[in-house]
Image (cartoon, helix red, strand yellow):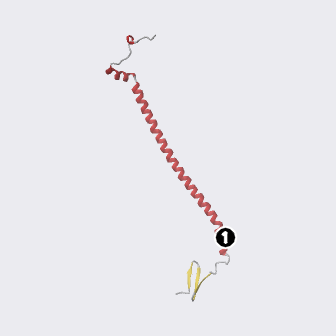
Amino acid sequence: MNPRTAFNGWTQRLDGATAALVRPANVAVGSRARVRAFCQRLLPAGLLLLAASLLSVWLRIALVRVAYRLDAMKHAVEQLEQERRELELERTAAESPRRLAELGRPLGLGPARWSREVPLP
């Protein structure tokens, strides 16, 4: 086994029973502190960006849900208006004098004659 094994840019020195990570020559001594400080500044910004993204997605989903409900309500209103127009036509046809005369003839009903009118005191 090779005494030095690559480990994420660092090398591991195996000396008997102990193993130690040795810093590569191109990594500065204070870079770990700088990386930690950078991550501490980056983490809140990342969390804020994540929260804003989730809020944006939630709002978009809510908007789509409301749009579907609005579309369903418009469709229901159109159906009700169509039904109202049809019922209005039925009522107009049912109240027409010609139709009432046709329905009343078999029952012996007809227009009032002058002789059938009774003057009220």
* 13 or 51: nearer the viewer: 51
Q: How far from the left and from the top, in percent, is residue 36?
A: 65, 71
**Residue 89 location (% of width, % of height):** 42, 30
Left or right: residue 121 versus residue 34 is: left
How many numbered discs, if any? 1
Q: Residue 20 occupies which quadrant of the picture? A: bottom right
Q: Which residue occupies 67% across, 74% down? A: 33
Residue projecting furthest to the left: 106
Residue at 61% of width from left, 62% of height from top?
A: 47
* On screen, residue 35 above or below 6: above
Residue 113 in the image: above or below residue 54: above
**For the residue carrying disc 1, how many other residues have a C-alpha within 10 Å: few (<14), some (14-19), or many (20+)?**
few
Residue occupying the far front of the picture: 121
Residue at 48% x, 44% y: name it. Answer: 72
Residue lying at the far right of the rendered structure: 30
| Residue 63 vertical placement versus 43 (above, below) | above
Residue displayed at 46% across by 36% down = 81
Q: Which residue is mark 1?
A: 37
Instruction: Locate residue 54, reporting x and y percent.
Output: 57, 58
Q: Mark 1: which secondary structure? A: helix
Image quadrant where residue 118 sits: top left
- The three-letter code of the residue at mark 1 reads Ala
- Left or right of 51, for residue 90: left
